[in-house]
Amino acid sequence: MNIEELINEQKRINDILSKAKNDIEKSPEGTLRITRSKSTPCYYYRKNSSDRSGTYINAKEIDLARKLAQKGYAMDVIRYLEPMAGLIDNVTQAYRDSSIHTITSGYNEARRKLITPYELNDEEYISEWIRKTTEQLQKYKQSKDYIAHSHVENLAFTTAKGETVRSKSEVILADTFLRYGIPYQYELPYVYRGEVVFRPDFTILNVRKRKIVYIEHFGKMDSESYRDSFFWKMKNFEKWGLIQGKNLLMTFEDYEHPFDIAAYIKDIKYLCTM
């Protein structure tokens, strides 16, 4: 299991623990005792440890038995998973804390200049990615394809970084990335088998995973012609290697349902920073 799989497993376990703790908080005090009368189970409500027999739970009160049984299950799950969660936390924290970049930090400047690092630190990696993608974007903007399909006149809205985008919702997205320190490029061409197949609204660099994520905003879902473009992309995304929730996040709005960034913050953080 690699570190990414370990982090995903950590998230899965934490989600389960959260559900179990929530069930315990909502459940009544006490425990459930079950006996059998011939082949029929009988349920009893033990309000405390000194109440050995408990109060009989009739058929009309079966919901109480369910809550108590769920509580017992939740407690067993927590006892089983918490030690495992602790071990994974220790491993992932050790991974986050370990870095070969600390080796060169002890060198003087003269020595560091003579060395080619085996791995760039985050700042160096971001800088190099921005440099390469900016060059790629500038080269594309000089191509016939860009000139023919760019619709530069639609770049009417300005982000906090001073770049122009096509909608207020894209301003909100761009400013959100800036606020969370997420490196991005706007409308960087996506190349599939040597050809530019479309220009994602945002190409994101997940610095922690050194992974690329794409954000595509669909802002006119009430328009029939716009939906045709949406369905065309949906048919091709998987072929192009874009999977929603893995390396792609689609956001939506229409006239009656304005874009709400709050609905996507968790997804953005998960895909772009974790």
Image: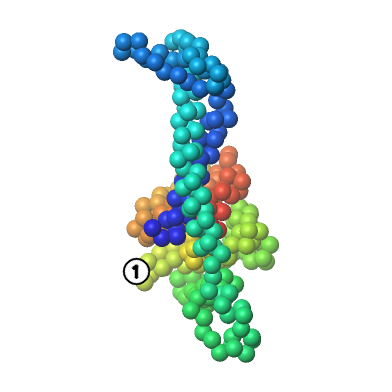
* Circle 1 SS class: loop
Asked whether residue 30 is in view, the answer is yes
Q: How is the image coloured?
A: rainbow
Q: Position of residue 179 (x, y in %)?
A: 66, 59
- For the point 46% across and 43% down, the residue is 81
Which residue is label 1 attached to? 193
Residue at (45%, 30%) from the top-left corner? Answer: 73
Horizontal placement of 174 versus 118: left or right? right
Place residue 164 in its image quadrant. Answer: bottom right
Taking the image as shown, residue 177 lies to the left or right of residue 73, namely right
Residue toward you, 228 or 162: 162
Q: Is residue 220 visible?
A: no
Give the residue at x 47% y 10%.
Answer: 56
* Vertical relation: 227 (above or below) 53: below
> Could you say which is closer to the camera, residue 132 or residue 82?
82
- Counting labels gives 1
* Mark 1, other Cα within 10 Å: few <14 / some 14–19 / many ≥20: few
**Placement of 184 over or under 245, stated as above or below:** below
Q: Position of residue 246 (x, y in %)?
A: 44, 54
In x, y percent, where is residue 126?
A: 56, 71
Query: Which quadrant of the figure contains the N terminus?
Result: bottom left
Residue occupying the point 57% across, 23% down: 29
**Type of amino acid at the residue the image marks with label 1:** Arg
